[in-house]
Amino acid sequence: MTKVMSFNPHDHEACTASALEKADAYCQKHALKFTPVRRQVLEILCSDHKALGAYEILKRLGPLGFKSQPPVVYRALEFLVAHRFVHKIEKLNAYVACMHHDTSHVPAFLICRNCETVAEAPNKEPSDLVAQIAKTNAFTVEKTVYEAEGLCVNCKEDMADDAR
Amino acid sequence: MTKVMSFNPHDHEACTASALEKADAYCQKHALKFTPVRRQVLEILCSDHKALGAYEILKRLGPLGFKSQPPVVYRALEFLVAHRFVHKIEKLNAYVACMHHDTSHVPAFLICRNCETVAEAPNKEPSDLVAQIAKTNAFTVEKTVYEAEGLCVNCKEDMADDAR
DNA sequence: TTGTGTTATGTTATAATATAACATAAATGA
DNA sequence: TCATTTATGTTATATTATAACATAACACAA
């Protein structure tokens, strides 16, 4: 299994730059407008692997010279989510940059309840649930939300250390 | 595969009565207080297989002689969710009565975007995601949210009919 | 049965999340 | 260039959820 990137040290500047470049290229290819607000919101979300609430993003837009009314950020998020540059973490009412935009995947998240880091799990296949349902014709799945809350390796180790 | 009850005709009165009885018995056994508000909220949620928002439940409590401030319903929901009589559908910020309280299960939901019926899928096994993670020690899963949005059989058929 | 701690409920206020509705501007393209 | 569409600005408000503090009911030992 691939390592879950967010919980491991990695060159984060490069990871952000690459996400933005990919978004740029994708928008160009599909004639989508990657406007300044949209770009900036994605950049803010890339800035770490935590999920950010809409109002937190809004707060960070202000100092960067953007208008700070809620619809501004909700619209940018709507665009970014629609084109899958960003996923919404329903459990947290918060948003994270997508880490696998170029590969087809079933969005699935691991949310550390301690450090609040959100990692996108490398699930390429739908879960049992979807497979089961698809077999019968009881339900046609259109969108899925798979989120797991728990403890990431780092926090678990920290807690073990503290206990000593 | 077991039929997904919510999308199929069934004796709904019996289904409600049974859920309440089971909750009653469980509370008795575990020395939990199944107070009037708690019972009433569960009854409201059992009344159909739609997910209801907290404020919708609140509205229905009023005429039944209960006090109608938000904390009243949120506290009742907190109790019911803690003891798994009710699940929260994160995607909808809404609540549904649990249909499988007596059997161990991984809560997983099928949400029809048309009629808003919520069915609890009969998943006994965790999805790929959880299984994958458990194998590595990258993450310790504590709680999961698996929700699929789409179209239930009935709505799909209706739409096909309309198209004719 | 009274006192003491605990759990549940009542009540007011407000925080946090999200959208409606309408106006203006910018870009696109016949 | 005009018309159309798409994006942004702005005000107001809807929806969901919790903090904080007060009172009541309950449980059970002294």
Image (cartoon, coloured by chain):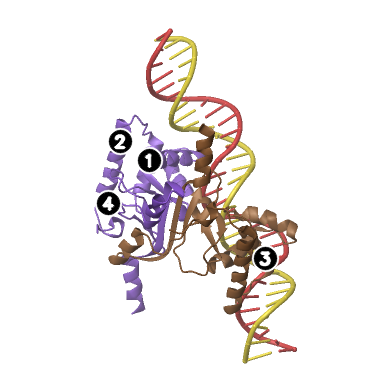
Chain colours: A brown, B purple, C yellow, D red
Mark seen at residue A37: 3
Q: What chain is tagged by disc 1?
A: B
- Label 1 belongs to which residue? B40
Image marks 4 and 2: residues in contact by CB distance under 8 Å: no
In this rendering, the answer to whether B163 lies above or below A19 is below
Q: Earlier in the sequence, mark 2 or mark 1?
A: 2
- Label 4 belongs to which residue? B12
How far across and down, in percent of the image, does residue B139 sit? 46, 48
- The answer to whether marks 4 and 3 sit on the same chain is no
Q: Earlier in the sequence, mark 4 or mark 1?
A: 4
| Front of the two marks 3 and 1 | 3
Q: Report the Cα–Cα distance between label 3 and label 1.
A: 47 Å
How far across and down, in percent of the image, does residue A33 sit? 63, 74
Q: Secondary structure at mark 2?
A: helix
- The answer to whether marks 2 and 1 sit on the same chain is yes
Query: What crowding class fits label 1: few (fewer than 14 Cα within 10 Å), some (14-19), or many (20 or more)?
Result: some
- The answer to whether marks 2 and 3 sit on the same chain is no
Q: Report the Cα–Cα distance between label 2 and label 3.
A: 53 Å
Q: Residue at x 45, y 54 (%)?
A: A147
How far across and down, in percent of the image, does residue A126 sit? 38, 63
Q: Report the Cα–Cα distance between label 2 and label 1.
A: 16 Å
Q: Residue at x 42, y 46 (%)?
A: B143
Task: Give the left or right position of residue A13, taking residue B145 as reference.
Answer: right
